[in-house]
Image: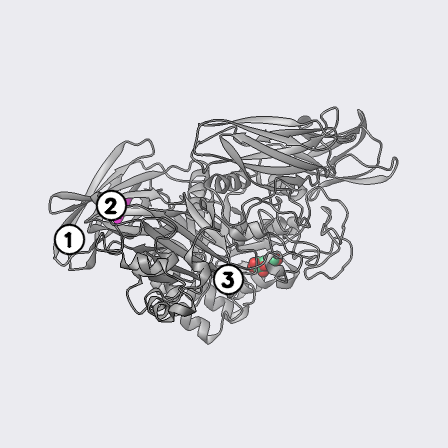
């Protein structure tokens, strides 16, 4: 039977080139130094048949006098560099891990696209035991994503390379494995190298930044991603087409039977399907079965119901494998009015974002994947484009769970062997997630539309469709127009995906295309690219800050007029969709700020500030604009804060609201009442300290309110956890919002106090951030300056239950203590 254990704990790593390590040797690799057992780990290459090799290791390096011996040893051991003979300088680490975020921003780094965080080489290594009882089963090491150009050695043997940082893969190491203490420890060694070419123009991280698994199954087993449950919905019922691929890793032909049991969202069994087949010697076989589901509970954005398929494989009558596949039942179609989800028109209110977060970089724990998706869902977004790479599987789990529709994107179109394998992995690993409604083959490939691109797509798309033909195919294009756009939209893909359709750049493109090609369908795959800095209301070039009213800095750092910056404004994006509903919705660039691609002030920023939330997930004012448009819940938001220096200075007060009218009060006195006629309601108000209050009306009734109060000097710290109780598993994380307040507890919106954290008990500080795109402080330090009054502290549990005590202190401020629970 199958077991799949998380393999993330107890690794060691070093940020250094300890090699080069050979990938070929004169004798079998079982003696290849650090990629085998070292430093007291159990090393028994011949299982008790002698210590000749250990002795050889001990005499190295033998020095000039013993040249002959050294040559002999080198011949066997691959002439290892000195650094590759010991792990004494390596540090302990649990995955997921991004080693580059630890290096942090470096002043001399030239790589601005990667946020001035240098590229690097790191080695990861783990020694572990496999019990004798596993003998006879398959031992498989699975990696969900390693950044990048990774090479792998196992028990001294070089076992392979994996180039892309965005796709998963596995190694079957059954025969190379040592079983039981008498055979010794097993060692997996991984070299990650980001110095040899990026895959993106954003910060990509480095290291084993997604999960790893130790999977053990029998010689007859379900193939990697070998189950596909494809629902077809008719009225209230559905039919599941279940495809199962089984492998045989023996030299005998085998007969097998597959029994699939389907459980409904409450865990009740709703039926079984069976199929049988014959497996060739060392080969695979795929069989199909069907199951009818009466009164199916359909997955949608409001009720994201999940079913589960349990696959049991029998070799003759012996149960040999069991495999679980969560899936959802829903239908998707695309029309002139955009997406139909279960037959219902569903505008796609989407965000794009990269895999980065404060405190952790690309090595994002599952709790933070959840935090990010929950944040965008709470403000009314229902879609996400995994730009520009296949999403981490736990991020898709979060989208399944919160009802967020996903465009899952392939990194690059190249019909090469390894890119075809990447495409296969993208589709097979995520085709059971109901959240995925479309596959994007690429983003803004500059050679799109060329003959070469057409030939490449001619190979990639039929191949991808052979793996899943139940979703929409598209790409996100920016440079295609006229006939070639029509060819993409009508012949190659189901939809023409267009980036920045609403911008001046693409003025009238959709109109022209739809007039000339009435059958063409469109989706706005990327929009806005509007940059603002949270809590900032005036540009500050040297600090890398862009005004929330709109900056005068244009895309590549030049200066335009007031509010010039960005490709399109949020209201332009929203209004364009309303005027052109056949564009299906929008995917704003971006949901969160991210490291790298510092735009527009690249000399002064280390992060982008395209997000409607900053790098911590704290909302900017724009976020309330979108929320007010997308949600019906009454909302009124005052921009800016009300803590200024100059009494009497005229301030522009902008209200983002979905109310019909709003009235503004200063210290209890009504200033004015206005109707919402365009994108917001605006007032010019002379500043007087005190309380600024906005109330929103519908049919003359007050339905919403917002208040901004003038803050005094910073006096204390407040902390608020997104989850006060977390799993004591050494993996779970609570995201703690840390605010600076005055002596009356009023939030100080411009506070920049340096806050130091001390975490004791059953947890530790995982990392810090403040959302400032210009901040060069290291996320792994124990203190952080507040930015616009806030810091985010990530607190991770240890492998233990009990209290986690978080203490935040800063000179001159009252200390704050927060107690979380690890269970
Ligand atoms: C788009 C691109 C994104 C990002 C964005 C910045 O064209 O697809 O990756 O670079 O521009 O505005």
The verdict on label 2 being within 8 Å of ligand 1 is no
Is residue 183 rendered to the left or right of residue 446? left
From the viewer's side, name the closer residue of 132 and 171: 132
Helix, strand or loop status at disc 2: loop
Which quadrant of the rendered structure holds the N terminus? top left
Majority SS type along the magenta span: strand
Is residue 373 rendered to the left or right of residue 40? right
Find residue 277 and name its label: 1
From the viewer's side, name the closer residue of 28 and 315: 28
Residue 86 appears at what percent x and percent y? 43, 54
Helix, strand or loop status at disc 1: strand
Find residue 161 and name its label: none
Which numbered disc, 2 or 3, marks the residue closer to the eye? 2
**Which quadrant holds residue 71?**
bottom left
Which range is magenta? 239-243
Residue picked out by circle 2:
180
Report how far apart the C-alphas of labels 2 and 3 lie in the structure.
Answer: 41 Å
| Ligand 1 position by quadrant | bottom right
Helix, strand or loop status at disc 3: loop
Q: Residue furthest right?
A: 648
Question: Which is more N-terminal, label 3 or label 2?
Answer: 2
Q: Callout 1: 10 Å neighbours few (<14), some, many (20+)?
A: some
Counting every numbered tag in the picture gives: 3
Is residue 809 rendered to the left or right of residue 137? right
Residue 414 appears at what percent x and percent y? 43, 68
Residue picked out by circle 3:
199
Residue 331 appears at what percent x and percent y? 37, 46
């Amino acid at each position: 039977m199958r077991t799949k254990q998380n393999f993330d704990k107890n690794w060691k790593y070093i940020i250094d080139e300890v090699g080069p390590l050979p990938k070929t040797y004169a004798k079998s690799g079982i003696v290849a130094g650090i990629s085998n057992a070292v430093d007291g780990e159990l090393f028994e290459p011949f299982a008790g048949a002698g210590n000749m090799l250990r002795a050889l290791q001990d005499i190295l390096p033998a020095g000039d006098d013993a040249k002959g011996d050294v040559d002999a040893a080198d011949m066997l051991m691959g002439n290892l560099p000195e650094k590759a003979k010991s792990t004494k300088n390596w540090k302990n680490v649990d995955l997921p891990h991004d080693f580059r975020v630890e290096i942090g921003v470096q002043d001399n780094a030239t790589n601005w696209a990667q946020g001035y965080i240098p590229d690097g080489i790191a080695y990861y290594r783990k020694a572990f035991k496999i019990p004798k009882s596993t003998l006879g089963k398959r031992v498989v090491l699975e990696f969900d994503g390693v950044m990048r150009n990774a090479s792998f050695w196992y028990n001294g043997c070089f076992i392979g390379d994996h180039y892309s940082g965005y796709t998963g893969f596995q190694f079957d190491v059954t025969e190379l494995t040592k079983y039981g203490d008498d055979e010794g420890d097993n060692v997996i060694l991984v070299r990650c190298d980001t110095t040899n070419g990026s895959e993106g123009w954003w910060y990509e991280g480095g290291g084993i930044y997604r999960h790893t698994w130790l999977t053990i199954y029998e010689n007859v087993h379900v193939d990697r991603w070998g189950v596909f449950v494809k629902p077809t919905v008719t009225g209230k019922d559905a039919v599941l087409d279940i495809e199962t691929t089984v492998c045989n890793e023996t030299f005998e032909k085998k007969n097998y039977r597959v029994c699939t049991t389907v459980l409904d969202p409450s865990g009740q069994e709703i039926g079984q399907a069976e199929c049988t087949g014959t497996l060739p010697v060392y080969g695979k076989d795929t069989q199909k079965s069907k199951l009818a589901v009466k009164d199916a509970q359909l997955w949608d954005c409001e009720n994201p119901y999940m079913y589960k398929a349990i696959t049991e494989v029998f070799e003759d009558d012996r149960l040999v494998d069991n495999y679980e596949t969560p899936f959802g039942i829903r239908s998707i179609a695309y029309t002139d009015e955009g997406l139909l989800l279960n037959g219902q028109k569903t505008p796609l209110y989407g965000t794009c974002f990269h895999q980065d977060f404060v405190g952790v970089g690309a090595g994002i724990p599952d709790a933070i994947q959840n935090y990010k998706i929950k944040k965008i869902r709470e403000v009314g977004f229902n879609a996400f484009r995994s730009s520009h790479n296949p999403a981490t599987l736990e991020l898709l789990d979060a989208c399944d769970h919160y009802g967020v529709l996903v465009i899952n994107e392939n990194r690059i179109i190249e019909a090469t062997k390894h890119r075809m394998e990447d495409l296969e992995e993208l589709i097979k690993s995520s085709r059971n997630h109901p959240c995925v409604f479309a596959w994007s083959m690429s983003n803004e490939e500059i050679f799109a539309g060329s003959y070469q691109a057409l030939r490449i797509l001619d190979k990639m798309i039929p191949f991808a469709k052979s793996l899943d033909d139940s979703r929409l195919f598209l790409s996100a294009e920016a440079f295609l127009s006229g006939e070639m756009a029509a060819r993409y939209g009508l012949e190659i893909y189901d939809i023409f995906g267009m980036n920045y359709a609403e911008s001046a750049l693409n003025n009238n493109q959709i109109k022209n295309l739809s007039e000339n090609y009435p059958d063409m369908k469109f989706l706005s795959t990327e929009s806005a690219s509007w940059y603002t800095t949270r809590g900032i209301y005036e540009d500050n070039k040297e600090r890398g800050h862009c005004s929330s009213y709109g900056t005068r800095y244009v895309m590549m750092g030049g200066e335009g007029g007031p509010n010039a910056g960005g490709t399109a404004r949020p209201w332009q994006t929203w209004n364009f969709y309303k005027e052109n509903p056949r564009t299906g919705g929008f995917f704003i660039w971006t949901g969160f700020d991210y490291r790298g691609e510092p735009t527009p002030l690249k000399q002064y920023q280390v992060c982008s500030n395209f997000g409607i939330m900053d790098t911590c997930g704290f909302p900017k004012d724009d976020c309330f604009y979108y929320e007010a448009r997308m949600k019906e819940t009454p909302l009124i938001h005052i921009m800016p804060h009300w803590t200024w220096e100059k009494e009497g200075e005229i301030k522009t007060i902008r209200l983002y609201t979905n109310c019909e009218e709003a009235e503004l009060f200063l210290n209890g006195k009504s200033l004015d009442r206005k109707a919402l006629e365009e994108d917001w309601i605006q007032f010019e108000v002379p500043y007087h300290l005190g309380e600024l209050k906005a109330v929103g009306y519908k049919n003359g009734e007050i339905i919403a309110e917002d208040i901004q109060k003038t803050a005094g000097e910073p006096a204390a710290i407040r902390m608020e956890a997104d989850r006060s109780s977390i799993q004591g598993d050494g993996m779970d994380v609570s995201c703690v919002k840390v605010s600076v307040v005055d002596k009356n507890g009023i939030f100080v919106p411009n506070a920049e106090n340096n806050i130091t954290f001390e975490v004791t008990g059953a947890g530790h500080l995982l990392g810090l951030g403040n959302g400032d795109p210009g901040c060069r402080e290291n996320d792994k330090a124990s203190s952080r300056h507040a930015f616009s009054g806030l810091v985010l502290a990530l607190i991770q549990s240890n492998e233990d239950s009990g209290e986690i005590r978080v203490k935040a202190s800063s000179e001159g401020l009252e200390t704050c203590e927060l107690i979380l629970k690890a269970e």
